[in-house]
Each structure stands twice: as C-alpha cells, then as structure tokens.
Image: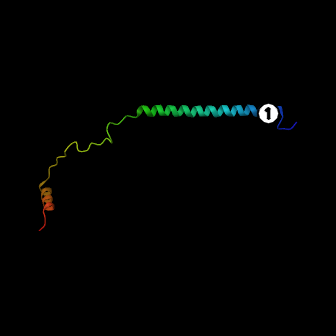
Amino acid sequence: MSKKNDLARRKRQHEFELQREKAEREKKEKKLQAKKNKMKVDGDKKKKKKGGCGFQVGKRKLKTKLSALSKAKAAQAMEVEN
C-alpha cells in the first residue's frame, strides 16, 4: 500500500477537513452575527432629518443698526462719481 492510501492517514485527513470546515462555518456565523448587531445599534441611533439639508434660508430678516461712521462709508460707496 502506498502512503497516500493508508487507512489511518485517510481518517486523520478526513477529521482534519471536518474540523477545518466547522471552524470556517463558526467564523462566518460569528462575522454575520457581529454585522447584524452592528446594523441594529447603528439603525436605532440614526434619526430622520426633516426637510432638505436642515438649513433655513430666507425665513427671518436680519436687522442691523449701522453706526454713523458705517452709514457715512456706505453712503460714500453708493455715491455715483461724476
């Protein structure tokens, strides 16, 4: 008999293959479970935003009081030079 065909060797090889497949399955299950748990946690914490971007544009007018100096500068800037 050749070494490859030895009964004891085949049994050991078969058991090794089964053990390796079982370890791979467990690893995949663990990874999948971790992914599911992560998705659950992330999904609960997220809140839906109302509206588009969350910015308010043109809702309120901004009122500012100009000082005398800034009024003079604005008037000078607006003046059309002859």
Q: Residue at x 15, y 58 (%)?
A: 74
Q: Residue at x 79, y 33 (%)?
A: 10
Asked which quadrant contains residue 27, the reply is top right
Q: Residue at x 42, y 31 (%)?
A: 44
Asked which quadrant contains residue 18, the reply is top right
Q: Point out residue 46 in the picture as x, y percentages from the top left corner.
A: 40, 34
Q: Point out residue 78 in the picture as x, y percentages from the top left corner.
A: 14, 60
Q: Is residue 49 left or right of residue 26?
A: left
Q: Is residue 12 left or right of residue 67?
A: right
Q: According to the image, what is the colour scheme of the structure?
A: rainbow
| The N terminus - image quarter | top right
Q: Residue furthest bottom?
A: 82
Q: Residue furthest right?
A: 1
Q: Is residue 65 left or right of residue 48?
A: left
User: SS for tag 1?
Assistant: helix
The local crowd at label 1, few if under 14, some if 14 to 19, many if 20 or more residues have their Cα within 10 Å, is few
Q: Point out residue 20 in the picture as x, y percentages from the top left corner.
A: 68, 34
Q: Residue furthest front?
A: 52
Q: How many marks?
A: 1
Q: Residue at x 63, y 32 (%)?
A: 25
| The C terminus - image quarter | bottom left
Q: At label 1, which amino acid type do we have? A: Arg
Asked which quadrant contains residue 14, the reply is top right
In the rendered view, tell whether residue 69 sits above or below residue 15. Answer: below
Q: Which residue is mark 1?
A: 10
Q: Point out residue 55 in the picture as x, y percentages from the top left corner.
A: 29, 43
